[in-house]
Every structure is written in C-alpha cells, then in structure tokens.
Amino acid sequence: MSADATTPCLTSTSAATRVTRIVRSDHVAAAALVALRGMGRTQLRAILDQWPSPPEALRAVRRGDAARFLAERSPRPVAHVETWPERLDAHGAARHLAQRDTRVVLRSDPEFPFEPELDECPAVLFAEGVRPDALDRPRVAIVGTRAATPHGLADARDLAFSLAGLGITIVSGLAIGIDAAAHEGALAAPGGTTIGVVATGLDVVYPRRHGPLTEAVRQHGLVMSEHWFGTAPERHRFPVRNRIIAALADVVVVVEATARGGALNTADWAIRYHRDVLVPPGSRRNPAAEGTNRLLRDGATPLLEPGDVLQALSFSSGYSRGGGAPWKGAPSWSTVRAPRPSDLAGEILAAFAGDPATIDQLASRTGRPLAEVTRAAAELEALGHVTRRRGFLWPN
Amino acid sequence: MLASVASALLCGIDGQLVTVEVHVSGGIPSYTVVGLPDAAVRESRERIRAALLSSQLPWPMKRITVNLAPSGVKKSGAGLDLPTAVGLLLAIDELPAGCLDGVGVVGEVGLDGTIRGVPGVLAIVEALRDAGVGIVVVPLANAIEAELVSGVTVRPARTVGELRGCLKGEDTWPAIPEVVAGTGWSGGVGGVGGVGDLDADGDGADLSDVRGLPMARRALEIAAAGGHHLLMAGPPGIGKTMLARRLHTILPPLEPQEALEVTRIHSAAGRRIGGGLARRRPFEAPHHSATAPALIGGGSGRLRPGAVTLAHRGVLFLDELGEFPPIALEALREPLEQGEVSIFRSAASMVFPAAFTLVACTNPCPCGRGAISCRCSDQARARYARRLSQPLLDRFDLRLALTPPASGDPPGEPSHVVRERVVEAVARQRARYRDRPWQRNAQIPSGIVVRELPVSPEGADALRLIGSQGRVSARGLMAIRRVAQTLADLDGRAALSIDDLLLAAELRVDVI
C-alpha cells in the first residue's frame, strides 16, 4: 500500500516495438478506482467529478471520504464500499496496465475521443491495439443483429470494406453477426482500421469463438472498454456498452435489427447523442429487417449506397478529423461485378426479385421446365450472381 | 408310450427346428416340460388339457414328460401347442403309429380345441422343408402363407378333433381358402393409415394431389427409381409428409423373390399373419421416440427385427429426423451402407436384411421458417444442424429444401404415369446390373462409381466445375453421378447428359 498516486511514473515496455511509454500517474489512479469491486460507472463519475484530480480522488477513497460522499449523495448503499480503502491497489493497477500495454483515456483528457459533456459519458476508457490513430479518423459505427441474414452480413461487410478503404474507422461491438461482418470488412480493406468496443474486460474474449477476430482487430485497430480486466460478460453491460459505440461514431449505420434487438438500443443512443442514423431498407418479410424498417419510419436516413454515409459524415463533426475529407469519388457496394448472364439465366435471376428462392419457386414463377431452371441456376452460381445456402439460392 | 413330432419355432426371422418328444408313463400324474421352455410354453399344459377335454379326447392321468429338442435352445411362443397335443395323442394311442412320420406340425390351440394361427409360418415351413419334411400341418389361418413355400404339402387344421380325424383317415382335410386380403389372426396389418398395408391397392393418395413443386416431385421419382435416400427440409405444415407418403404410389411392384422376403419378415414380426404374398412395398414410419433397438432390431431374449428390417425392399420414413435420439440415427449408418444389419447380443447374434430407401423430413432450423424468414441465431442454427451427423447426412443422395407451392401452380402428373417411368427405369437398371452384386444405381459402391458410370468429356467438365465451387465433396460427386444415371434411366437414355448432372448437383445441396 505504499504506492501512492504521487509515486513517480511507471514505465511500460511493449515487447513488439520496444518503445517505452510512460503511464501517467493520474491514469494509474483512475485505473485503480475502476478496478475497485463494486465501483459502478455512476459512482466512478461522481467521485472523479467531486475531487479535482484522480490522485486526489484516490486519497479520498483511502481516507473514507469518498464512501461518506457517496452515502450522502444517494441513500442506496454501494456494495463493497467498506472494503475500498484496503483494496485500493495503485501499484497492482499500474502493473496490469504496463503488462498488457493498455492505454487509459480520462474524460478530462484533451485526447478523449468524444464530447465529455454527453449524457452517461464514461469517466475512463481503456484501449488496447497497435493503431491509436484509429481514433484520429472519421468514425462510422456499423452495428446490427446477431441473427443476421446472409444479405445483411454481405451488406455490412461490403459497406465496411469500402468505407475503411477510404480511411474511415469502422466502430462496432465485436459481437456475432453484423458486428463481426463489419470488423471483417474493415480488416479486409487495405489500410483499414476498426475499433471494437467490448462489454467485458479487455482480457476477456466474448464470444469465445471471436478470439481470432479480436486479435485481428487489436493488430489493425483498437479494442476498447470501460471495464477493468476480468470483467465477465453480463447481460446488463451490453446496452450500456452501446452508448460508447454511439458516442465514438460520427455516423451510425444499423444494417439489420430485429424488432427488439440490441442494435435498436445503439440507435437510441445515437439519436440521444445527435449522431445521424443510417439504415438500409429491408424486406417486410425479413424478421431481421423489422427493427431497421421501423427506424426508417421513425425518421432514420435511408442508406441506399455507401455514398450516403459519406454525405452524412460530411455534415458531422468528425468530417474534419484527421485533416479533412480523405475520400475521393463515390464508393460502390461491391468491388467485383459479376459478368452478364445469358438471356435465360437473366430471366431466372429476375425471378428471384432479390429474395432467396428454391428451384421449385423459380420454375413456378417463370413457367420454365426444370432442366432449364437448373441449367440457369448452375450458370448464375458459376458467374457469382447467386450463392447457395441452406438449400436456397441467394442472389448476391 | 413315446412319440416324437417335428416342429419349428421362430428365431429372429428364421425358422428353428424343434423336435417335440412326449413320454407318457405310469406314476403320480404330472406334466413336465423340459428343454428351456419360457412361460408361454410352460402354460401350454393348460391350453392343451382344456383343448383335448373340449374335443372329447382323454387326458391321461399319468406321468407326462415333454422334451423340446435341441434342449439347449430357449423355446418361446405358443407354436408348440399343437405338436405337443398331437404327440400326446400319439403317445396314448389315440392316433395310429406312424401317421406323423415325415410330417411337421405347428400351431397354437385354444381352450375349446380350435387351432389358432401363429406368426412366422413362412419361415417355419421353410425350415421344416429344408429339414426334409414333406407334409406340414398348419393352422387354417396360416395355410395360404404356408402354401407360398414350394416343395411341401400343406395340410390345414381347424380344430384338434377334426385334425385327429384327418390324421386317422376318417375325415377329409379342409380346403385352403382362396381369400387373400384381410384374413388372419390379429387383423394382421401394421403401418400407419393404411399406407403400410401390404395387401391394399392404395389408400386413394396420388401424386396429382400435389400442386407445383416440380423439383420435389422429380426427387421423389428419382428416389423411387434409383433407390436413393431422400432428405427434405422445410417449414412445418408445408407438405413434406404429404409428399413422402405419396412416394409409395410410384414405387415399382415387388419382384416375386422380394415379395417372398417381405412376406416372411412381416409374418415373423407378427405384423401380418396368414395372408398371401405381399403385394405392396412396405412403408414404415416409426415415431421419433423410437429407440435404437426399435429401429435396427434387437431386444432382450428373443431378437426381433426392427423398423429397418420391416422396411426391407420398401421405404423407411423418418419424420422430424432431428428429433430421433442420436444413437438411433447413428445406428442407421450400417444398414444404409450394407443393406443388412447385424445384431450382437451376449446370447446370440443375428443378421437381418435391411435394404430400404430412407426418406427423412426435418425442419430447416429451430424456428422452422428457413431462408429469409428465419429468426434463429447462427448458434441456434449450428446447434440444430449438429444433431444430424455429417456421416449420416452424407448418405442422402437427394436433399431438397421445400417451399410451399404458389397458388397458381397446376396439379402435377398422376402417380400411375410417374410409376410407369419408374418401372421402366428399374427394368433398365436390372438389365444393366444383371451380373453385378447390386440392382439399383443408389447401391453402386462409391469406389467404383467412376468406372461404372462414365461421363462424356463435357460432363467431366461440368463435374469439375461443380466440385470447384467447394460445396460438394468427392463423395458428393459420386452421389451426383449415381443420381444423374437414374435421371438418364428415367428418360430412357443410355448415357447421362450434362442436364442430368446439373439437376443431380442441384439435389445435392446442404439443406440445413
């Protein structure tokens, strides 16, 4: 317990780059506060707002002043608050940060990535990854449902790919479905960067199968969280995490959302934070487009092509970040255009009307014999116009 | 004082010879059965005693010993009642000596002296014939079935009293009835809703009841003609079961040898006792609560054939495939591959025939909607798909995602038109595979499909293209060739065309 916030700065050595970085004492103090058991985001903000600097807040916690202050502030007892004075471990926090080469950003720092006056603004953010410059670019969040359709996944991937290729950072939540597709699209673009905001500690991978994806995001961007290491995934943390995604973004794109999904929650935060919300329209028959279509009805901007995102971005405050508009020309949805099919295959392709179909349905809609439809389907698949999934043909 | 009568019991689906020896001697009156009898055999004493007394025949107040040889084999069932009864009559000189030389006897007796039919008479009479028996006495209810065995004279018996008269030469043997359908001892038909009735001409279902869905009908036709296993995935209530049940209406008729096999199995299973030759292919539809022994056969004590054997030469229909216990489904792999199933128990092992066409239905995902309307998460879908193992899915040459027909779709061809094509395609395969160990395209082993079913250079290109798209495995390409050959057979062409290959490839997609 000798480590006081006045302890001289600790150093961190990144093995990969051999660059020694200084961990600031106020960052260590703030991290030590976040690490306290029972310290919620509201208590943290209250304490850091009450005392002029994190080291002084740390001393207040050690003296027990902070506990008294919280008790006066709200009648609701704070769990484990009595253990805080002896649990406070600035040294341990500093060691953790140094070991993992984790950056800390305080709400009071000039480099804090968004407006500190936002509602529910996190007091402290942790970031890991090799591209801190990901924050210095215009930022577009691409979020959506975990139960996405192949079309939704392809849209998220294509959009992320073309925007990331223009030097825009793609922000998402490292979840299954649309989130993962957005990160993957950004990672596939040359020079693309992406930020994954997680609802756990930065040392926890959730979902487990996203280990490789999380690592790739770390290698080509940033992984961010407001939680201390070891924080497990819990249901209530995800909606709260969404506010950071919305706050980080200059524009929020919701690719597919079910009627009651978490993606709509991100859109709510975006509206609260005055971020433009863009939504590609979907079929009314697609349950994964129910939420997004409602957003459209409620006034979200329809997203018909990637250029719509650029236009929204140019009205946002992020437009000038990183030295003005870095993009030239209008990006397109798909980088590869499939070759023109034969007349017969073209007729069959039109019969899809954009939705997945079976051979039976195509034969019924065109009145063509089975042999012609299967021949056309084989041609369309070979040319890349359709993909097969779960027994259906999906137009690309 | 000693008599011996030849008889046989059912063991699995085969007959097992049993010699019934009856010894009557002085001493304290008693009745003892030795030779590993089970409860039903031990109870025969009461049936036989009442039957003899009801027929105004004497029951000797002496020491009676019945031995069932071979003594080491467990005996079960009531089929030994009649041989025991006539043996007893012989032993007490109520029947002339020598009247049962070269005669086999089988049957159950009732308390009033009537003789009741027993299961598995076809197999039992075959076993007796193979043992050199020239005349068999069977219950009248089993007479038609027993007559199916060549090289043996069938004597039907109605009651114990009448049988005694016939054996003594005082009465004439009753005539064997001409009726085929519906005769029998327990109603005798299994299956569901008449579809499994081996005698009926049909239950009125017809393929023309199905509107549209040309691909689905084609898949059924291919399954019927080539014997390919078919998996259909689709939302609930879409007509998967309706389609599957109509497969029956386009199956080719049973060959004489096949009909005999089917009759033998269904009689042995007690499904159909005393009818003539089976006329329709079996259609077995076990519920998804079926256990592995129920599907492949087994049971403790006497081994019994399971659903795969009852579906021999016909269709095994598994609705809601994913709901079956995984152990039961994995047990299907051997019969699917080999056309028979070996069952091993510590007491005995047995091989049952099981050459069937598997037709299975499943929902595409837990929510059942499939494709674009599906509300399932990736994990939920993956978990659902994991219920069906890849090795099992690989056995399905035909997989099909079903969608509902559109309202304007025309009704399709009636069953009899399709069936004619199927019959011709089957004849073509039979002629082609005369000197091969298989009869249908689906049975060609994967290893020699390439040699057996050559394709043109253009066809080879098409197969290469299909393979290069990465969704069809090498095993899948073999399946595509087999299905394409069936398509050519249905069309009456010798060689398979590119269109055949493309259509076959279209039916080899992953549906879940």
Image: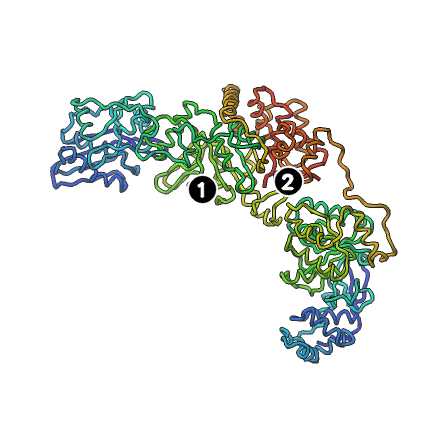
Q: As rendered, which of B383 and B96 lies closer to the eye?
A: B383
Q: Amino acid at mark 2?
A: Arg
Q: Is residue B7 above or below residue A389?
A: above
Quadrant of the snapshot with the C terminus of chain B: top right
Q: Which residue is mark 1?
A: B287
Give the farthest residue toward the right.
A323
**Residue B232 in the image, given as x and y percentages of width and height:** 55, 37
Q: Quadrant of the N terminus of chain B?
A: top left
Q: Quadrant of residue B61?
A: top left
Q: Is residue B475 visible?
A: no
Label number found at residue A389: 2
What residue type is disc 1 on?
Answer: His
Query: Residue A231, relative to residue B383: is it above or below?
Result: below
Left or right of A246, for residue B161: left
The spot of residue B104 in percent (x, y) is 26, 27
Q: Nearer the viewer, residue B437 or A302?
A: A302
